[in-house]
Image: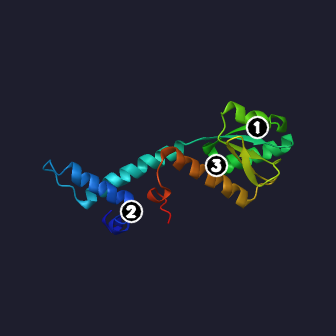
């Protein structure tokens, strides 16, 4: 772990934990080294990653045909596994989606614009054969939704982004 210490010392979360440990244990005769803080940091990261792995987005899939629904559903399941709980709906039920407030995202092959809002929900348009950029847009939504739910900055959590 010591070889990774210089890299993590620049992380703002590590610095906050280090300061918190120093303030908390200054009144108690316990000595916490940077290695101990790194262990706390990795435990904290593991807890957040565990929560991220359990995070599920309720998605409505709206397509023109049964074949599109079946294919796109399997493609989404392949790429996102359990991160998306997909419910397939008909195009006639698009207006009802925002009324029941059970969905976080609408994925559709029928929207006119590439992405827009249906009520307060984010809607992402995909083609009958979803492209890499369309899947990346869904992946980005899932990541943003998770960080919005826990209220943390993406830069603090693994994988560390700049």
Spot the residue most to the top: 100
> Could you tell me which residue is drawn at 44 percent across and 57 percent down?
156
Of the two numbered discs 2 and 1 on the same chain, state the one appearing first in sequence. 2
- Contact? badges 2 and 1 (CB < 8 Å): no
Circle number at residue 80: 3
Spot the residue most to the front: 119
> Could you tell me which residue is drawn at 38 percent across and 60 percent down?
12
Residue ID for mark 2: 11
Q: In this view, does 110 lie to the left or right of 107?
A: right
Circle number at residue 2: none
Nearest to the eye among marks 2 and 3: give it. 2
Q: Is residue 24 above or below residue 96?
A: below
Disc 3 packing (10 Å; few <14; some 14–19; many ≥20): some
Residue ID for mark 1: 88
Rendered image coloring scheme: rainbow
Q: Residue 96's x, y, as percent?
A: 76, 33
């Amino acid at each position: 772990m010591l070889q990774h210490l210089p890299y993590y010392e620049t992380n703002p979360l590590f610095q906050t934990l280090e300061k918190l440990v120093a303030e908390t244990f200054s009144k108690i005769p316990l000595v916490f080294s940077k290695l101990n803080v790194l262990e706390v940091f990795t435990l904290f990261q593991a807890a957040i990653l565990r929560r991220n792995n359990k995070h599920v987005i309720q998605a409505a899939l709206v397509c023109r045909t049964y074949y599109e629904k079946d294919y796109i559903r399997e493609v989404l399941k392949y790429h996102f596994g359990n991160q998306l709980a997909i419910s397939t709906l008909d195009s006639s039920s698009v207006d009802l989606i925002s009324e029941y407030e059970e969905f976080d995202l609408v994925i559709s092959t029928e929207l006119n614009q590439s992405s827009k809002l249906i009520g307060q929900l984010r809607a992402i348009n995909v083609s009958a054969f979803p492209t890499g950029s369309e899947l990346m847009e869904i992946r980005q939504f899932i990541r943003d939704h998770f960080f919005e739910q826990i209220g943390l900055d993406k830069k603090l959590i693994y994988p560390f982004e700049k």
